[in-house]
Structure formats: structure tokens, C-alpha cells
Image: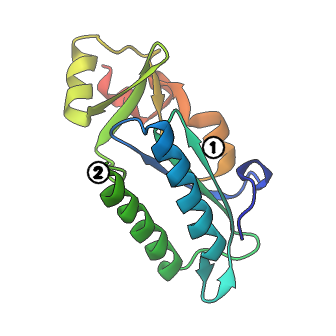
Amino acid sequence: MLVDFNDLPETSRVWIYQANRSFSLEELEEIKQKLKGFITQWTAHGADLKAGYEIKYKRFITIGLDQGLNAASGCSIDASVHFIQELEQAYNVDLMDKMNVSFKQGEFVAYKTLADFKKMAKNRSVSPNTIVFNNLVTNIAEYRTNWEVPAKDSWHNRFLN
């Protein structure tokens, strides 16, 4: 059951997929249609899942699930991962690699390997105040308050010393 992402409760679970490049406007329209189609038919053991999505900075796909109605099962999570893998293949993009870091450089969103980010921190090319994207948040409340934060306030802080 597809709902507006902003109508999901704060306790809703989120999964964030960051792309290794920005999507074009045409790709974004196609991806939105595919997300709508996937979420509309997404179920857990035959029961509807109340979910929505959001795409930010032409790069981050966030899927939110209200687990108050029905919780995700192993099979439904597998289905969502398979869907994301299909997007990766269709658009020749990496969405699943958690060993990469996205951060803001002005209004531009940069994407680097974790090793490159560590080097940048060592060279002081990124600072404790650099805005990073903490894709480890688990619910909408955290997503709204702790997803886009200064590096000093996220797990990225360990690389800044």
C-alpha cells in the first residue's frame, strides 16, 4: 500500500540507498514510477505493507515502512533488495555499497570510497563541520534529525582525528 512518505509515522523503518552518481531527470521519473509499482504490490506473507518513498539530491532513495500495520518479513526485505538490485542493473548505478561516503561540498553532493574519505579527513579536506549523510539511521525520526549532519555528530567522526 503506497502512501506519501511524509504521512508515515516517525517510528517507521527506513532503508536508504545512495547512488554513486546523480540520476538524470528522465531516470528519476522512471525510478519514481518503478518505486510506485513496487511499493503498491509489496507484501509480507500476503499482507499489505504501508510504505512510501522519497528521493533526495537526485541520489538517495529512501523507502519508509510503517511497521505498525504489518512488519517486514525476511521475504519482503529480500524482495526490496531484489528490487534495488534491478534498479542498479537498469541504470548502471551502485546503490548497495555501504563502504562509500556521501557528503556535501557546498551544494554539491560528493561520493567517495571510505578509504578516500579517510585520506581527505587526514589531509583536512573534510572537517568536523562537513555535512555527511548518515545512512545508518533506522527510522523516520532519526532520518529527519540525524541523516544529514556534521561529520562530528555521526559515525564519520572516527576518521577526523
Look at mark 2 in the image and give the residue it sits on. 92
How would you rate the neighbour count of disc 1 (Cα within 10 Å): few for under 14, some for 14-19, many for 20 or more? some
User: Which quadrant of the view contains residue 126?
Assistant: top left
Look at mark 1 in the image and give the residue it sits on. 142
In the picture shown, does residue 57 fall above or below 39?
Answer: above
- Percent of width and height locating residue 154: 47, 32
How would you rate the neighbour count of disc 2 (Cα within 10 Å): few for under 14, some for 14-19, many for 20 or more? few
- Foreground residue, 82 or 11? 82
Question: Residue at the spot x=63%, y=43% of the render?
Answer: 142
Q: State left or right for residue 158 relative to residue 145.
A: left
Question: Residue at the spot x=22%, y=16% of the render?
Answer: 122
Residue type, numbered disc 1: Glu
Mark 2 residue element = loop
Q: State left or right for residue 20 relative to residue 53.
A: left
Residue 10 seen: yes
- Percent of width and height locating residue 34: 53, 61
Residue type, numbered disc 2: Asn
In the picture shown, does residue 124 fall above or below 10?
Answer: above
